[in-house]
Amino acid sequence: MTDYTELNRAHWNARTAVNAGSTARYDIAGFKAGKSTLGPIEHEELRDVAGKSMLHLQCHFGLDTLSWARLGAHVTGVDFSDDAIALAERLSQETGLDARFLCTDIYKLPQVLDDTFDIIFTSGGVLCWLSDLGQWAKIIAHFLKPGGVLYLQDEHPFLNVFDDTADVTDLHTRYPYFHMEQPIRIEGLLPYSDPAANQRSVEYAWSYSFSDILNALIAAGLRLDYLHEFSHGGNRRFPFMSQGEDGRWRWNDSANEIPLTFSLQATKE
């Protein structure tokens, strides 16, 4: 059987070095100087984290994790990329921001972590990398304290049906909306990086509908507090998008009302 986790781990190890050098997307120098990588949606919706314990799933190299630490949260970041976690630990030391980082596959996290948390946070293109959404939701419920909350922000699931290759000129469907057991194989330039780097990679991703996401959380025993949808996003997903003064990306055609981002909060009762 193909080990998609290991193939994606190799992809994310390669992506770590490219992303770390991206000033437009990540801007590590700006972060070290005090810039937060958290967007306006997180700041508006997830408040009063000071003194609370937080588990950040799929944290990449930890800029969001450390941004929460700057706000006073006691944060643990988790990612399966060895290179990403090594960089996260270096950034924690260099900035003096206290955070714990664990390198593990999310599905193996209960084997290496015993704590429970007030908040579980995950954001920014995370769901498509999960092979088992039901098990993911159960792991979240396992690590939440009673009364604790999951905060999730991600790209809108309907957006994932469209062709987003670099030379696309209009919206047309290319990928499935409903979940399939076998992942989608995607080959191309490493995303969010300088195209001049000309580094290519292969990744494997899964599609999930909105009903898949909500039903997985409900089945795990979580209560949905809210679900919000937004017409702006954190990435230039398609060439025909423009970045506003707030740093968010929107459709060039204002008549296009397809949502770009969603957020939700769910509570463990």
Image (cartoon, grey):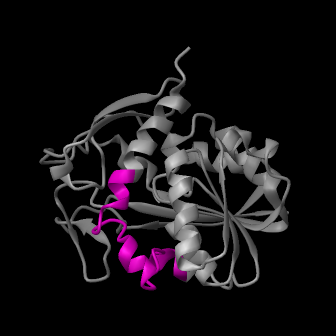
Classify the position of the C terminus by image quarter: bottom right
- Residue 205 seen in this snapshot: no
The one of 6 and 218 positioned closer to us in this rendering: 6
Count of numbered badges drawn on the protein:
0
Residue 21 within the magenta-colored segment of the rendering = yes
Would residue 4 appear left or right of 224 to someone viewing this image? left
* 102 to 74, vertically: above or below: above
The residue sitting at 58% across, 34% down in the picture is 131
Image quarter of residue 32: bottom left
The residue sitting at 45% across, 44% down in the picture is 13
Query: Residue 58: x, y in percent?
Result: 57, 53
- Residue 30 seen in this snapshot: yes
Query: Residue 51: x, y in percent?
Result: 76, 83
Residue 184 within the magenta-colored segment of the rendering = no
* 57 to 227, vertically: above or below: above
In the rendered structure, which segment of residues is drawn in magenta?
Answer: 17-43
Classify the position of the N terminus by image quarter: top right
